Amino acid sequence: MPKAGRYREGVPCWVELAAGPDRRRARRFYGGLFGWEFVDLAGQPGYTVATLRGAQVAGIAPGPGGEDPAWLTYLAVEDADRSAHAVRQAGGRIVREPEEVAGLGRGALAVDPAGAVVGLWQARLNPGAGLVNEPGTFTWNEQLSPDPDGARTFYRQAFGYDYGRPAGDYTVFRAGGQPAGGIGGNPGVDPAGPAALWAVYFGAADTDRTVELAVELGGSVLDGPEPTPFGRVAVVRDDGGAVFTLIAAATTETAEAA
């Protein structure tokens, strides 16, 4: 995905764990897995920002009552109110209206026609993640559903995506002409999970070792690890039930030496 910074329209800019009532458990798991440290967000009771080497990388929220813990992707937008209108015009729903967040930006929550939940983030002081594409940070985001063609139509209309050459039912989407994520069919590795979702990938210096550590911390493996053209991949469920994907990612030292 693109580098951290001022994110372009439609680019995934933030990931957030709706952790349910026990955020302490999430801190233990992800602190142990990725080395994250945590800061409570002033002005937003119950919200925690995860940091790595001093840069913010993810959020942990209490989550709506009665729903299973899950990772949520936020897309950068120039105007949250205008984007919410575009979501409705394209056939989606807004389940949390645009609202100011502690002076940091304006956020909303949408559901696309397939049922996948996605956030909208209009940056003010906070553009989103300050570190990406490294071990312990998110590296890729993709919408998976039983109707990838319908999803492509929706996201083109709502966010202006264009698409690369398809590989089966999977297509990389571009925002501002640059690859920014993927849309494809849901492979069903989590039979208990939703039919449509935005999947979040986190980088791992060693996918197999990180999977072993996740299990030691109380998580479980849904798929893999297995090789892919883009790195060794595994799908993992954390100890609270939230699912995410691990993919091999170069360390800063490796990237600088390349």
Image (cartoon, rainbow, N blue to C red):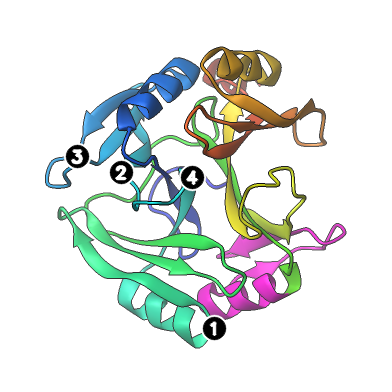
Mark 4: few, some, or many residues within 10 Å (few <14, many ≥20)? many
**Residue 153 in the image: above or below residue 46:** below
Q: Is residue 7 left or right of residue 246?
A: left
Residue at 68% in and 71% down? 152
Q: Is any part of residue 249 visible from this angle?
A: no
User: Who is closer to the viewer here, 86 or 144?
Assistant: 144
The amino acid marked with disc number 3 is: Leu
Magenta extent: 150-177
**Lower position in the chain sequence, tag 1 or tag 4:** 4
Task: Name which of mark 1 and mark 3 comes first in the sequence.
Answer: 3
- Residue picked out by circle 4: 71
* Cα distance in 3D space between marks 4 and 2: 12 Å
Q: Residues within 10 Å of mark 1 (few under 14, many from 20)?
A: some
Identify the residue position indicated by label 1 in the image. 91
- Which residue is painted at 71% across and 67% down in the image? 163
Residue 167 is a magenta residue: yes
Pair 3/2: label in front: 2
Tell me if residue 194 is in the magenta stretch.
Answer: no
Residue 143: quadrant of the picture: bottom right
> Residue furthest toward the front?
66
Q: Quadrant of residue 30?
A: top left
For mark 3, what is the residue? Answer: 41
Question: Is tag 4's residue or tag 2's residue first in the polypeptide sequence?
Answer: 2
Q: Secondary structure at mark 4?
A: strand
- Left or right, 182 with reference to 244: right
Instruction: State the CA–CA distance, disc 1 to disc 2.
Output: 28 Å
Residue 210: percent from the left, percent from the top? 61, 17
Task: Please state which amino acid type lies under the numbered disc 4.
Answer: Trp
Which of the marked residues, 3 or 2, is nearer the chain's N terminus?
Answer: 3
Q: Residues within 10 Å of mark 3 (few under 14, many from 20)?
A: some
Callout 1 touching callout 4 (CB < 8 Å): no
